[in-house]
Amino acid sequence: MTAIYLSLGSNVERHKNIAAALDALAILLGELRISSVYESKSVGFDGNNFFNLVVGADTDLSIAELSETLKRIEDKNGRKRSGPKFSPRTLDIDILTYGNFVGVEGGVELPRAEITKNAFVLLPLAEIAPQVLHPQLEKSYSDLWAGYDQASQSLWPIDFEWQGKIISNA
């Protein structure tokens, strides 16, 4: 089993799509470690605010198998791939890390660069994996968050319930 971290985001029917993604991931991966859900302004384009969170789990799937399965979950939830890269999303699920793998496999570059670039990725990752080390930088996610320019992107926790459980509080 390999420890993985995934970033989830949506700015179209946000609650519905994030809940559907969590349902699908729980079926696929079993027990999930789920961060708080954060709302943030869209980055790279003008659009509705996003809901973002990070999920940790363990898998026997290869990187390529995991990537293809995540694309199917996105597609099942209305993801359109024909528009510009930075555009509204029903659902976006990205592999952030796959164990300590560093490199490109199956078209997926890991660890994902967004970990250190976007507060909406780094903060929830530091929340659920504070002492885990970034595979390339060999710094903990809590240390990376402490050194991040936290004024550069604003985000805030929201109330979010999934499967009858409160997983996030404002």
Image (cartoon, grey):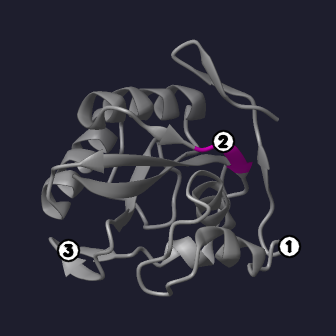
Q: Residue at x 60, y 48 (%)?
A: 52
Q: Earlier in the sequence, mark 1 or mark 3?
A: 3
Q: Quick one: 133 or 74, which is closer to the camera?
A: 133
Q: Please, what is the three-letter code of the amino acid marked with disc 1?
A: Ala
Against 35, is 19 above or below? above
* Magenta region includes residue 7: no
Q: Residues within 10 Å of mark 1 (few under 14, many from 20)?
A: few
Q: Quick one: 92 or 105, which is closer to the camera?
A: 105
Q: Secondary structure at mark 2?
A: loop
Q: Secondary structure at mark 1?
A: loop
Distance from Cα at disc 2 to Cα at disc 1: 19 Å
Q: Secondary structure at mark 3?
A: loop
Q: How many marks?
A: 3
Against 63, is 30 above or below? above
| Highlighted magenta segment, given as a residue range | 35-39
Judged by depth in the image, the label closer to the viewer, 3 or 2, is 2
Do the residues under discs 2 and 1 have CB atoms within 8 angstroms?
A: no
Q: Which mark is residue 151?
A: 1
The answer to whether residue 61 is seen in the rendering is yes
Outermost residue to the bottom:
137
Residue 158 image offset from top left, x and y in percent:
76, 36
Where, quadrant-wise, is the C terminus in this rendering? Answer: top right
Residue highlighted by disc 3: 107
Against 5, is 44 above or below? below
Residue 127 image offset from top left, x and y in percent:
65, 54
Q: What's the magenta bit mostly, secondary-structure-wise?
A: loop
Q: Please, what is the three-letter code of the amino acid marked with disc 3?
A: Gly
Q: Which mark is residue 36?
A: 2
Compared across the picture, whether 94 is left or right of 47 comes to: left
Q: Please, what is the three-letter code of the amino acid marked with disc 2?
A: Ser
Residue 7 image offset from top left, x and y in percent:
48, 54
